[in-house]
Image (cartoon, rainbow, N blue to C red):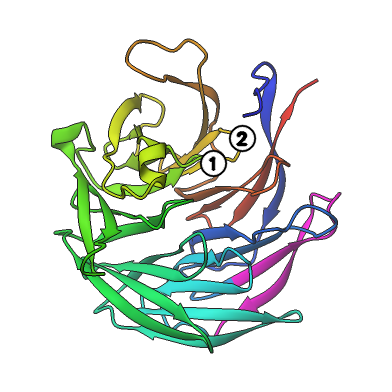
């Protein structure tokens, strides 16, 4: 874990990416880009039914150009996008009740598979660490797990029912095949495969009764080692959860997650997005148009880790911020997407 120099850091806007004609919902940086001579690639999706691919001009440049606009993939809002771990495939989830799988051929992207099954809007899509499983969730209250087969075939291996309302986001654990979902029903659910039956089941529900959120949970993210998870909510709080990672990685998928701390008073409207950088900085984006950055503070108390505000960027956008995403490389670039139709690229750097 790199020690973060806290003094004199500022979040500087380096570019505004314009082109979407409606709110921008989702963002995803392509893995293994932005380093070793490979320019960074970013995908965005939104209410204009398009998916846009943005590419950094060079690894030393902070300028991004729109490489391609994909307009024929979906017939309604594209809510979420995610690259497979290898970066070979891109999944997009839409209000048209489908999830599309795209592959890049040269500079062109083509749809190689369409996943159907949800009754209505698909809200989120996530690949597991090995790229062998895909999860989707929907307003139909269900979470689907798909097995990735050769020849761009996707086989639904489980339909998970347990949430009582719209499921906002699915996210796989970064190292173990355990799936997390969060919902309008105010809970986060943890799903794992039952070794005996090969079926998936809910192994834990994090709700208000165990220090969870009191309103819709919009998003979650894991730290690099996977022993902590951060969640954000309509209740305007951010919560950090922890697990015994050794137990989890030894195969005990029902190892329980416990509440470590709650951060409140930093945003005054719904927090829609949270993302933990590889070096340990938590970014949040909210309906108050602000971005906040948090880091773990040195003074640990008996109650466990504490987090403190590194900085707050007021008026980061003109409208609600729907997504914040750190670049996977160590360049400290942060992308944000908003109802104002723009994506902004920020750099966290020292003022000196």
Q: Are marks 2 and 1 in contact (CB under 8 Å)?
A: yes
Residue 270 appears in the figure: no
The quarter of the picture where the C terminus appears is top right
For residue 110, above or below residue 304: below
**Residue nearest the observer in this picture, 101 or 42:** 101
The reply to whether the magenta stretch includes residue 58 is yes
What kind of element bears circle 1? loop
Segment colored magenta: 52-72
The quarter of the picture where the N terminus appears is top right
Residue plotted at (26% across, 62% down): 195
**Residue nearest the observer in this picture, 102 or 346:** 102
Residue 263 drawn at (x, y percent): 36, 26
| Pointer 2 residue | 279
| Pointer 1 residue | 224
- What crowding class fits label 1: few (fewer than 14 Cα within 10 Å), some (14-19), or many (20 or more)? some
Q: CA distance from mark 2 to mark 1?
A: 8 Å
The reply to whether the magenta stretch includes residue 77 is no
Is residue 209 left or right of 288 when viewed as pictured? left
């Amino acid at each position: 874990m790199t020690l973060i120099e806290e003094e004199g850091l500022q979040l500087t806007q380096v570019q505004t990416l314009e082109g979407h004609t409606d709110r921008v919902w989702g963002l995803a940086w392509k893995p293994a880009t932005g380093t070793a001579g490979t320019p960074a690639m970013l995908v965005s999706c939104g209410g204009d039914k398009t998916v846009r691919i943005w590419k950094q001009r060079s690894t030393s440049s902070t300028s991004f150009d729109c490489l391609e606009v994909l307009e024929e993939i979906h017939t309604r809002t594209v809510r979420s996008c995610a690259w497979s771990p290898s970066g070979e495939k891109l999944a997009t989830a839409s209000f048209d009740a489908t999830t599309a799988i795209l592959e890049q051929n040269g500079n062109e992207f083509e749809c190689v598979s369409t996943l159907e099954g949800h009754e209505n809007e698909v809200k989120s899509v996530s690949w597991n660490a090995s790229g062998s499983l895909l999860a989707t969730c929907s307003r139909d209250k269900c979470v689907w797990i798909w097995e990735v087969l050769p020849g761009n075939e996707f086989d639904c291996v489980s339909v998970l029912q347990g949430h009582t309302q719209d499921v906002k986001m699915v996210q796989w654990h970064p190292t173990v095949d355990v799936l997390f979902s969060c919902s309008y029903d105010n809970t986060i659910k943890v799903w794992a495969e039952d070794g005996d039956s090969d079926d998936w089941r809910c192994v834990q529900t994090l709700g208000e009764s165990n220090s969870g959120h009191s309103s819709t949970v919009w998003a979650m993210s894991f730290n690099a080692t996977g022993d902590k998870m951060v969640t954000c909510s309509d209740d305007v709080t951010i919560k950090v959860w922890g697990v015994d990672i050794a137990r989890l990685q030894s195969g005990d998928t029902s190892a329980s997650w416990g509440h470590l701390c709650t951060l409140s008073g930093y945003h005054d409207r719904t927090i829609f997005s949270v993302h933990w950088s590889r070096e340990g900085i938590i970014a949040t984006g909210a309906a108050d148009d602000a971005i906040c950055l948090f880091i773990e503070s040195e003074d640990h108390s008996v109650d466990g880790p504490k987090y403190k505000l590194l900085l707050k960027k007021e008026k980061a956008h003109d409208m609600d911020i729907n997504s914040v995403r750190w670049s996977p490389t160590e360049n400290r670039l942060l992308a944000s997407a908003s109802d104002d139709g723009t994506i902004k690229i920020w750099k966290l750097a020292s003022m000196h």
